[in-house]
Image (cartoon, grey):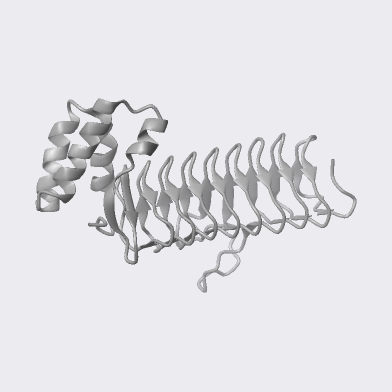
Amino acid sequence: MIDPRAVVSPQARLASDVTVGPFSVIGPDVEIGPGSVIGPHAVINGPTTLGVDNRVFQFASLGDAPQDKKYRGEPTRLEIGDHNVFRESCTINRGTTHGKGVTRIGNDNLFMAFSHVAHDCQIGNSTVFANCASLAGHVEIGDWAILGGLTAIHQFVKIGAHAFLGGGSIVSRDVPTYVMVAGNPAVPHGVNSEGLRRRGFNEEQIRNVREAYRILYRMELKLEEAAERLAALAREQPELAPLVEFIGRSTRSLTR
């Protein structure tokens, strides 16, 4: 299943049914799981692991050295889960020793053309990166988050689960779970209620999330006061627990 025009290192480990297209380069210390398809002109360097049923389109670059002037060639890693799609010209870099040492990508993610994931980023499951969405180093993206085209995320920012970032957003502070933001700089624009419906949240749960948004953004409370109210509500409304947990982990302050 390997095109004779591809270059595959003898030190790479590919499952028996992996397909590699012409002119692709697979370096040493790369492991690719069953069912994966590597298109033409792709480059995968290691140490990098890809799980089951990943699809890598032409001219994508996975697992190359981080774009960090402090990097000195240390053996950092890229770890990719299952069922991910990397479209044309995606760039995904390995970690750094002054970060986590590893860039991680979960399962069922879609990276559209020219999207970029920098060193030490941690990506959850079922996210969507539209064309040219870009992450600086050390960014964390929660499950089901959607990044619109040309979105740019500052280093060390956290994006919560089910968040929605409108196209062209410039994000320098943390975006809470469930929240939609847009603009330069990005500002909140309500709750991603349509996304929550698609993922099985019922109307009562969505109303509770909207009320939590009102407490956080519309009541002119200090963040500590809003967090206390939300924590109390989360005892009876478990859908608010991820939001409360996110606020507690925020390190760059919230987009407000």
**Is residue 216 visible to us here?**
yes
Q: In which quarter of the image is the C terminus?
A: bottom left
- State whether residue 13 is above or below residue 240: below
Q: Horizontally, is 53 left or right of 220 in the view? A: right
Q: Left or right: 98 with respect to 55?
A: left
User: Is any atom of residue 250 visible in this view?
Assistant: no
Above or below 229: residue 119? below
Image coords of residue 48 (percent x, y): 64, 50
In this figure, what is the number of numbered marks? Answer: 0
Between 126 and 246, which is closer to the camera in this rendering? 126
Which residue extends farthest bottom? 69
Vertical side of 121 occupied by 50: above or below: above
Residue located 27% across and 54% down the image: 188
Give coordinates of residue 108: x percent, y percent.
55, 38
Q: Residue drawn 28% across and 44% down?
A: 246
Image quadrant assignment for residue 211? top left
Q: Which residue is depicted at the point 45% across and 54% down?
A: 148
Q: Residue 215, image x and y in percent?
A: 14, 44
Q: Which residue is drawn at 36% across and 34% down?
A: 196
**Rendering coords of residue 51 (x, y %):** 63, 38
Q: Determine whether, in the image, residue 139 is placed left or right of residue 211.
A: right
Quadrant of the frame with the N terminus: top right
The image quarter containing residue 244 is top left
In the image, is 167 to the left or to the right of 208? right
